[in-house]
Image: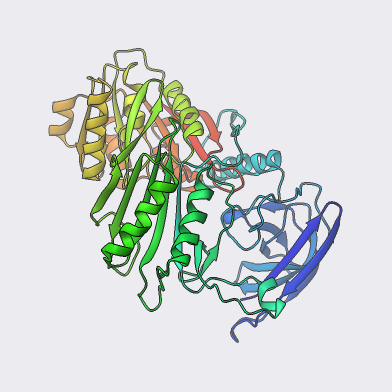
Amino acid sequence: MFVGIFKNTGNKSSQLFYFCAMGRRNKNKVFEAVEVTGAGGKGKGIGKSPDGRVIFIDNVVPGDVADIKTTKQRKSYYQGTAVNFHQFSDKRVEPVCQHFGTCGGCKWQNMGYEYQLEYKQDEVLNNLIRVGKVELPEVTPILGSKEIYFYRNKMEFSFSDSRWLTPEEINSGKDFDDKNALGFHIPGMWDKILDIKKCHLQEDPSNAIRNFVKEFATSNNLSFFNARKQEGLLRTLMIRTSSTGEIMVLIQFFHEDKAKRELLLDAVIEMFPEITSLQYVINEKGNDTIYDQEVVCYKGRDHIFEQMEGLQFKINAKSFYQTNSAQAYELYKITRDFADLKGDEIVYDLYTGTGTIAQFVAKKAKKVIGVEVVPEAIIDAKENAERNQVENAEFFVGDMKKVFSEEFINNHGQPDVIITDPPRDGMHKDVIAQIIGILPQRIVYVSCNSATQARDLSMLDEYYKVTRVQPVDMFPQTHHVENVVCLERK
């Protein structure tokens, strides 16, 4: 793999570049003075090679002019990295994070936020037009986030006993005795962890907790995990916070060592008595997922609460909840507005998760039926509804492709409005076919992937007209964007 690193300071720049050889099958090329004209998928810049092919470029901002060395070549495009800059874009800003350029989490930190929003809006519009090929109303300007840093309510960090060394460290000639890391995976490398000193995504005490855990574990000879050898004690650290000020910390251990486990957990709760929920998992599997593991509550509750318009939502270690609480509230308000409920409608909320949207719109509907394939999520949804005294919402476990049976419709009523918030892959074609089979008056489609959303809209186009479109930025400093579409039956 080829790597290029640069540092931009104001209008001047100092540039450091480090190279490692490509595989023999790749024929690297250098294209000189390529203008970066746009931003594309996965946060990469877009340029054009002399032979007319598109180049997807790392470490650039639209408006840059740079020499590009290719890292991959295909029939219709190249992938590459900037190795020399002729001109820096006026869209550039100085990244605030010391880990920018190595950590892959906030790839647009070097681009002004107003331009980030502009390119996200363009992505949504281009997908709806090019993929969906549907007639569109005027698309409402994207709703930006008030907080562009420290906005996430959930972070997951990985332990490693062989941390990733930066090019600066490698070229310093120093010996590094401390090889432990607690941080993020290097992009594309499942076993390489970058040690994080300060992350700008989650508010304090997130950084303080992570740094304390690493320092205490290192000082007390608690072994960090080695993914290749499958050995070591400490695997992952998860921190969840809520808008109500509650904090959940979960530490995942590779094997049980009661004395060392309690030593660390006791130290954490003594240092941070404000923690609402301290939990742990003993996970001896080959992967870090905890959804099939027993989560043990060590101190406090086994959950924290999120709150929205007086509704309380119980969040446990395995719960899904939108990771930007403030923008989730804005997203749900838009969804409710698009649903345009008068009080006498039956609403089906597909992919309901823990029922947050369903309960949020319930007070404006006659009845809401939430459907989700994950049984644990439906248990949480029912418990939340009971706590919130939402009596007109019911929740069911079901395969979305089979939910609209004649019996189900007879039991719960013909939906007037369907709200759907599927995963990134979008809705299965069978789900779309079932929606077409019952033809509700209105569909509100919430999506974290406007490309698959556009594909689904094209399949609904014969029966529905897109009447409203509202992109929402949930993840500043990244290329990700949510989009809400309202469809009315033709």
Q: Residue 397, image x and y in percent?
A: 20, 40
Image position of 125 (left or right of 487): right
Image position of 361 (left or right of 166): left
Q: Nearer the viewer, residue 166 or 188?
A: 166
Q: Residue 338, image x and y in percent?
A: 45, 23
Q: Nearer the viewer, residue 11 or 257?
A: 257
Number of numbered markers: 0
- Name the quarter where the N terminus is drawn: bottom right
* Residue 187 showing in the rendered view: no
* Residue 398 showing in the rendered view: yes
Q: Residue 79, image x and y in percent?
A: 64, 67
Quadrant of the rendered image containing residue 292: bottom left
Q: Nearer the viewer, residue 265 or 50?
A: 265
What residue is rendered at 23% in x and 54% in y? 294
Image position of 2 (left or right of 275): right
Q: Residue 185, image x and y in percent?
A: 50, 64
- Name the quarter where the C terminus is drawn: top left
Residue 190 vertical position relative to residue 349 in the rendered view, above or below: below
Residue 400 vertical position relative to residue 311 in the rendered view, above or below: below
Image position of 370 (left or right of 109): left
What residue is rendered at 59% in x and 60% in y? 103
What residue is rendered at 35% in x and 68% in y? 233
Q: Nearer the viewer, residue 284 or 324?
A: 284
Quadrant of the rendered image containing residue 45: bottom right
